[in-house]
Amino acid sequence: MTSYEFTHQVPSEWVDYNGHMNDAEYNRAFSLATDAFIDFIGLDEAAREKYGYTMFTLETHTCYLKEMHEGDTFHITARVLNYDAKRVHLFLSMFNEEGKLVSTQEEMLMGIDQNEGRPAPFPASITQSIQTMYEQTKTEEQPKQVGRQIGL
């Protein structure tokens, strides 16, 4: 399995009255990247139909580190921090064209049996993809944004 990367450009409708990418649009970008990640691990539209299985986002935490502007290209990478039979703890990093980290999103995803409408273990092939991604980075230091709490 090759490494995952999602690339996009900031469209004009994502820019707010401050002249930079609106905070909601960072979340849209991460959502699009998460959908692409789900496809990347083998749970694309055909597999979702075949298995009657999908993934839901349970929780997210976004950190905004640098501004993005109209027309800026960004790349989002994904790292599996941990997983179990039904959940993936995912960390997404957004980089600008210069390779500088501009935003991060930590996510918890849950596998869902669409026929039952409830959490269920991943299909075996999906578990294998998730495990492969996890194994590639499990010994790396965790990003400093992981597990952050909001407070004064």
Image (cartoon, rainbow, N blue to C red):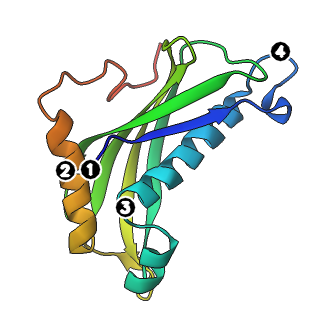
Q: Residue 131's spot in the image, x, y percent?
A: 18, 53
Say few, some or many: other residues with alpha carbon within 10 Å of mark 3 (under 14 / 14 to 19 / 20 or more): many
Whole-number angstrom distance, CA of label 2 to CA of label 3: 18 Å
Instruction: Answer whether labels 2 and 1 touch (C-beta < 8 Å).
Output: yes
From the viewer's perspective, tell me whether residue 83 is left or right of residue 8. left
Q: Residue 69's spot in the image, x, y percent?
A: 74, 18
Q: Is residue 113 above or below residue 107?
A: below
Whole-number angstrom distance, CA of label 1 to CA of label 3: 22 Å
Q: Residue at x 29, y 58 (%)?
A: 87
Give the residue number, with chain letter if any, for mark 1.
Answer: 1
Q: Say which element carries label 2.
A: helix
Along the line of sight, which residue is nearer the eye, 75 or 87? 75
The amino acid pointed to by label 3 is Met
Whole-number angstrom distance, CA of label 4 to CA of label 3: 35 Å
The amino acid pointed to by label 4 is Asn
Q: Say which element carries label 4.
A: loop
| Mark number displayed over residue 18 | 4
| Mark number displayed over residue 132 | 2
Could you say which quadrant of the image residue 26 lies in? top right
Whole-number angstrom distance, CA of label 2 to CA of label 4: 41 Å
Whole-number angstrom distance, CA of label 1 to CA of label 4: 40 Å
Sequence-wise, the earlier of marks 1 and 3 is 1
| Closer to the eye: label 1 or 3 | 1
Say few, some or many: other residues with alpha carbon within 10 Å of mark 4 (under 14 / 14 to 19 / 20 or more): few
The amino acid pointed to by label 1 is Met
